[in-house]
Image: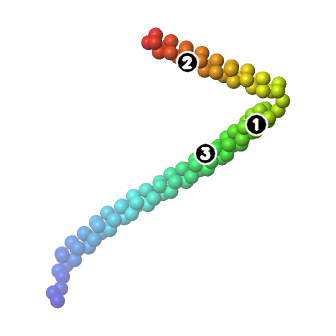
Amino acid sequence: MASWGGAEEEELDTRNQQRSYALAGKVSTLRSLALDIENEAYEHNRLLDGMGNDFSSGEGLMMGSLNRVKNLLTSGRQNRKVMCYMAGFVILFVIILWYLSSRMLASE
């Protein structure tokens, strides 16, 4: 087997060092990307947990409202009369909003 000359060994060492520096740079970049991904995943999980809590509290409010409406509907005749008035008011309010919005769109 032929022995390597000194210049060839130095050139190989220089290339190996350049490649190891390039590899170290790429590893550093990958490490920083992995840390960024980890931080982003942590923030998204925290956001999703917060949204879950918000939906749970919203569900509680909706269930309370539904229970109140059920109690109102199952109670006496006077409450039914109030409920009919309220439904009429809501329908009238929606009709007024529709009329005003259609006039505003027509004027544009």
Residue type, mark 3 in image: Met
Q: Earlier in the sequence, mark 2 or mark 3?
A: 3
The one of 41 and 19 positioned closer to us in this rendering: 41
Residue 28 in the image: state x and y as whole percent: 40, 61
How far separated are the C-alphas under marks 1 and 2? 29 Å
Residue type, mark 1 in image: Lys
Question: Pointer 1: what residue?
Answer: 70
Question: Pointer 3: what residue?
Answer: 51
Residue at x-position 68% and y-position 20%: 88
The one of 37 and 61 positioned closer to us in this rendering: 61
Q: Which is in the foreground here, disc 3 or disc 1?
A: 1
Residue at x-position 55% and y-position 14%: 100
Residue type, mark 2 in image: Trp
Residue at x-position 78% and y-position 23%: 81
User: Can residue 50 be spotted in the picture?
Assistant: no
Q: Quadrant of the C terminus?
A: top left
The residue sitting at the front extreme is 77
Quadrant of res 17:
bottom left
Question: Pointer 2: what residue?
Answer: 98
Q: Quadrant of the N terminus?
A: bottom left
- In the picture, measured across the screen, residue 6 lies left or right of residue 93, that is left
Q: Secondary structure at mark 1?
A: helix
